[in-house]
Image (spheres, helix red, strand yellow):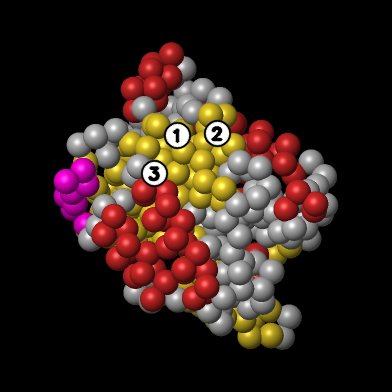
Amino acid sequence: MPFSLMDIAVRRYGHRGSLWITRFRFITLEGMKVAAVQLTSTGNITENQEIALTKIREAAGNGARLIVLPEATSQNFRSGRLDEQAQSLEGPFATAIQALAEELEVTVVAGMFCPADTVERDGKTINRVSNTALIAGPGVLGGYDKIHTYDAFDYRESDTVLAGESLVAFDVDDLVVGAATCYDIRFPEQFKELASQGAQLIVVPTSWADGPGKLEQWRLLTAARALDSTSYIVAAGQSRPGGDAEAGNPSGPTGIGHSTIVDPNGVRVAEAGYEDDIHYSEIDPNEVAKTRRTLPVVTPAD
């Protein structure tokens, strides 16, 4: 069996500043093929669950061992209140993905929303959610809660989303994989910290906003974070609503496509366009080690 579970417990193994590093342990024997799945979520979590399961089966059928789906896979950002369809990691959306991941012996990362807290904003009571990157594999069900909420460009994600506090890493095959989500990519310290704790690949589920200069920023930031951390970046985004016809027009954070896989030297080895797609790449841990010997910008944690 190419995938075997070693330790399903969540282990807190480091504290740097105010952030805890949480790590899930997986062990396998072979190298790893990854898939960045670009899709278009609807406003219905049940529909999106079926879309996700179909894409996971396709990617696994093509040999992917780590399958990354976009931020907001469970419900897109333009479809109304997030709290009304938010589910815990024990709910049907997460458990259906975990069950399929177990069946296929793969690891899946997919964006969803979990109930979080209740706050008052401008006289209104708001039930906030966590913007969670679900991490699911055989015997494992966990998640990373997005740390940096998208409070930028006249949008305030923090009004409806509670920011996370913990960095998360997990092992798949011979690689340590770190997790980040969308707007996190503008914060190099998070990627450097994940790398210092051993991450060789960082997944970034995303629902990027379109508009003038936004695609150029996305390409620059994904390459920069790969260079900062000397890690592979696997960034899976929502497709651009309206596809090529709407490309470049200003939008909210509903997707720009251009899911990408970037190597530790900042070279883009795969990139999608604006429409639904799946891109694959073989990940070589030796390339990470070689890059870090040549360019020692990451200081390993004690």
The Cα–Cα distance between marks 3 and 1, rounded to whole angstroms, is 11 Å
Q: Tell me the residue that label 1 is attached to.
A: 281
226 in the magenta segment: no
Q: Are marks 2 and 3 in contact (CB under 8 Å)?
A: no
State whether residue 117 appears in this view. yes
- Which residue is under mark 2? 270
Query: Residue 282: percent from the left, percent from the top?
Result: 40, 32
Q: Quadrant of residue 79?
A: bottom right
Figure check: 96 above or below 207: below
Query: Circle 1 — which element?
Result: strand
Disc 2 or 3, which lies upstream in sequence?
3
In the foreground, 86 or 115: 86
Q: Position of residue 12 (x, y in %)?
A: 29, 53
Total numbered labels: 3
From this view, report whether residue 197 is shown above or below residue 55.
above
Give the left or right position of residue 120, taking residue 286 as reference.
right
Picture coordinates of residue 147, whole percent (x, y): 52, 56
Picture coordinates of residue 48 (x, y %)? Answer: 52, 68
Which stretch did the figure color magenta? 1-8
**Residue type, mark 1 in image:** Ser
Cβ atoms under marks 1 and 2 closer than 8 Å:
yes
According to the picture, the residue beneath numbered tag 3 turns out to be: 62
Asked whether residue 192 is in view, the answer is: no
Q: Residues within 10 Å of mark 1 (few under 14, many from 20)?
A: some
Q: Nearer the viewer, mark 2 or mark 3?
A: 3
CA separation in Å, label 1 and label 2: 7 Å
- Point 61% across, 69% down: residue: 42
Q: Earlier in the sequence, mark 1 or mark 2?
A: 2
Per the image, label 3 sits on a secondary structure element best described as: loop
CA distance separating discs 2 and 3: 16 Å
